[in-house]
Amino acid sequence: MQDKTKEIESIIGHKFKRKKFIEEALTHPSCDNGISYERLEFLGDIVLDVIVGISLFKEYPSAPESFLTDLKSAYVNRKYLQKVGEDMNLQKFILYKNYEIPHLDNFIEAIIGAIYLDSGWKKTGIFVKNFILNKKIQPMQNHKNTLASIARKQFKTEPIYEIVSEKGPPHKKTYQVKVKVPGRRYVGKGSAGNKKDAEMSAAEELIRKLRRK
Amino acid sequence: MQDKTKEIESIIGHKFKRKKFIEEALTHPSCDNGISYERLEFLGDIVLDVIVGISLFKEYPSAPESFLTDLKSAYVNRKYLQKVGEDMNLQKFILYKNYEIPHLDNFIEAIIGAIYLDSGWKKTGIFVKNFILNKKIQPMQNHKNTLASIARKQFKTEPIYEIVSEKGPPHKKTYQVKVKVPGRRYVGKGSAGNKKDAEMSAAEELIRKLRRK
């Protein structure tokens, strides 16, 4: 464990004063050894959100709120953070006893919580800048907003979403969603591991169909 | 305007070094004078979240993540913040040109963003402690989680939510939602100004029906 702790410290560029924080951040409850990353994930989630948000707020002094929201979503979403975890080979350092590898995005957040507790805002900001804000990316396209605005302007109505199915165990669900614009015959369908992403992808499909006709 | 600024400063207990922040925080875009509370609301939303979250994290050192999440939700939700705004008579200080009074919760968040920009974490923390964390409240009951756990344990399935209707203009929508547990004949219905609250209330109704039988 000590060698592994040193290795992950060197990867993330932070030497912990209190090693128990990084150990807790990398332990899945399936290990049943009395510690779990979950509280640190709670903390890291909100700390990450505010560091990214404040940084964008300052970087784009005249951008509207909607741009800031969409760009923040592009940095703090599960998929992006999962990729950050994969790039640092995080799965190697997580202690778990399931057959499935846990979602890495949760552990990225837990690491952020651990650095914050260990060393405060400044050091946490450095980690976030080096590993999360280090790439220039596009604001997350909010297809639901786009579809709502098409529906309002062109058809004076609102899209209606429906969950077609919700399958699988809690930690590995798949949602199937469909969306319609009342009075139009087209249907958009989407599926994903969470409801919002499934709705986004259904909205994207419906936008394509409405524009094609 | 100067008198009003002094009055709101005295209510919230913060004297702004830069008055433009509090003026921006209290201006609705309908005034069309080039400023709007919306960027400050973006900032205040995440700053509030992290101040409440960190405070609860420290106050309850052995509570599970789910408790922290539910208790944080009880403090940062729209309804609670709306009440905070009403208690300080905030509507009196908001500049707007609609016929309807804007939602006060957004302006509470904008004020938090303004204090943060004006004076940093410490002063913002004082405002949050005095006006938001000053009441002991119960964790928000997450009826969706409760229903999902009943459905899993008793019926080996998952609840299915459906949006029945989504009515009204963007700033004043009403969602009607129904929920079923596959194979059971009961239906829970709920409506609210946002999807999540409508789902919560539908879940609550279905739980009552499932427990009654």
Image (cartoon, coloured by chain):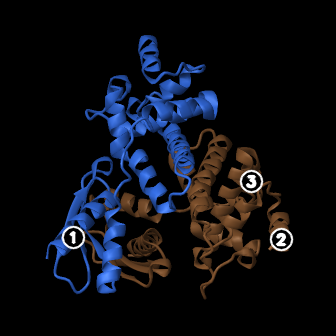
Chain colours: A brown, B blue
Up-down relation of residue A200 to residue B50 (above or below): below
Compare residues B48 and A2 and report the one nearer the observer: A2
Task: Label 2: state its secondary structure.
Answer: helix
- Give the residue at x 77% y 57%: A130
Tell me which residue sits at (20%, 83%) in the image.
Answer: B184
Disc 1 target residue: B206
Q: Circle 3 sits in a helix, a strand or a loop, which is it?
A: helix
Residue A200 in sight here: yes
- Residue type, mark 1 in image: Leu
Can residue B97 be seen by looking at this rendering? no
Residue identified by numbered label 2: A2
Horizontal and vertical percent for residue A85?
Answer: 70, 71
Check disc 3 and give the amino acid type. Lys
Query: Secondary structure beneath disc 1?
Result: helix
The percent coordinates of residue A197 (x first, y second) are 47, 71
Task: Give the camera-side residue of A12 and A39.
Answer: A39
Quadrant of res B20 = top right
Q: Position of residue B174 (x, y in %)?
A: 25, 55
- Few, some or many C-alpha atoms within 10 Å of disc 3 (few <14, some 14-19, many ≥20)? some
Q: In this rendering, would A127 be left or right of A138? A: right
Frontmost of labels 2 and 3 is: 2
Mark in the foreground, 1 or 3: 1
Residue B143 sits in quarter: bottom left
Mark 2 to mark 1 CA distance (whole Å): 50 Å
Residue A170 falls in which quadrant of the image? bottom left
Discs 2, 3 touching: Cβ within 8 Å:
no
User: Relative to residue A209, is residue B109 depicted above or below?
Assistant: above
| Residue A129 - label | 3
Disc 1 packing (10 Å; few <14; some 14–19; many ≥20) = many
Q: Position of residue B30 (x, y in %)?
A: 38, 33
